[in-house]
Amino acid sequence: MDIDTAAQAISLLLASGASKGLIEEAGKGLAAGAIERIRKVFGSDRRAIDALEQTQRGDTSIALTELVAALRWYAQRDSEFAMELMRWAYENASPAVHQEVVAGRDAYTAGRDQTIIRHQHSSD
């Protein structure tokens, strides 16, 4: 997983609205100190802190975009934070779902002749 993907995943998790409950439950969601760690890394960067807070409240998609950019920017400058960010994203990732589509004719025109087989792989 790269930094961009991890920053997007963590930002979306925080924007989900369920993140506060997940953080408080042991063994689920982000580690208890993740939000505090992000705040510490952001330091006195008021714009990044505002983006974090607005994203947690679900205020705007602009805040989400700014949070992704801030997480990416700080992770590119702090390798320890980058590793933490990727670990959090990995721990909270849902299992990958892969689809295989087999069509009797051209896939664009053969909608009724398609067979879709879904394979779900756990990340364990």
Image (spheres, rainbow, N blue to C red):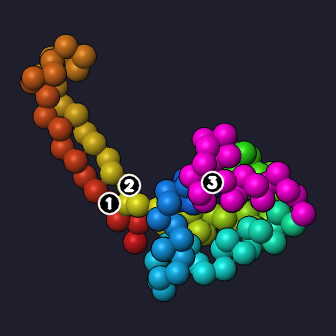
Q: Main secondary structure of the magenta part?
A: helix
Q: Is residue 124 in sight in this rendering?
A: yes
Q: Callout 3: 10 Å neighbours few (<14), some, many (20+)?
A: many
Q: CA distance from mark 3 to mark 1?
A: 30 Å
Q: Is residue 3 above or below residue 113?
A: below
* Residue indicated by mark 3: 55
Image side of residue 97 versus residue 1, left or right:
left
Vertically, is 110 above or below 91? above
For residue 96, the mark is 2
For marks 2 and 1 on the same chain, the one whose residue lies earlier in the sequence: 2
Q: Secondary structure at mark 1?
A: strand
Q: Report the amino acid beneath label 1.
A: His
* SS type, badge 2: strand
Query: Distance between the Cα atoms at labels 2 and 3?
Result: 25 Å
Where does the magenta region start and end? 44-65
Q: Are marks 3 and 1 in contact (CB under 8 Å)?
A: no
Q: Are marks 2 and 1 in contact (CB under 8 Å)?
A: yes
Residue 9 can be seen, yes or no? no
Q: Earlier in the sequence, mark 2 or mark 3?
A: 3
Image quadrant assignment for residue 95: bottom left
Q: Is residue 117 magenta?
A: no
Amino acid type of the residue that numbered disc 2 sits on in the rendered structure: Ala
When asked about the image quadrant of residue 75, the answer is: bottom right
**Which comes before the other along the chain, label 3 or label 1?**
3
From the top left corner, tell me how far across and down residue 74 is, in percent.
81, 57
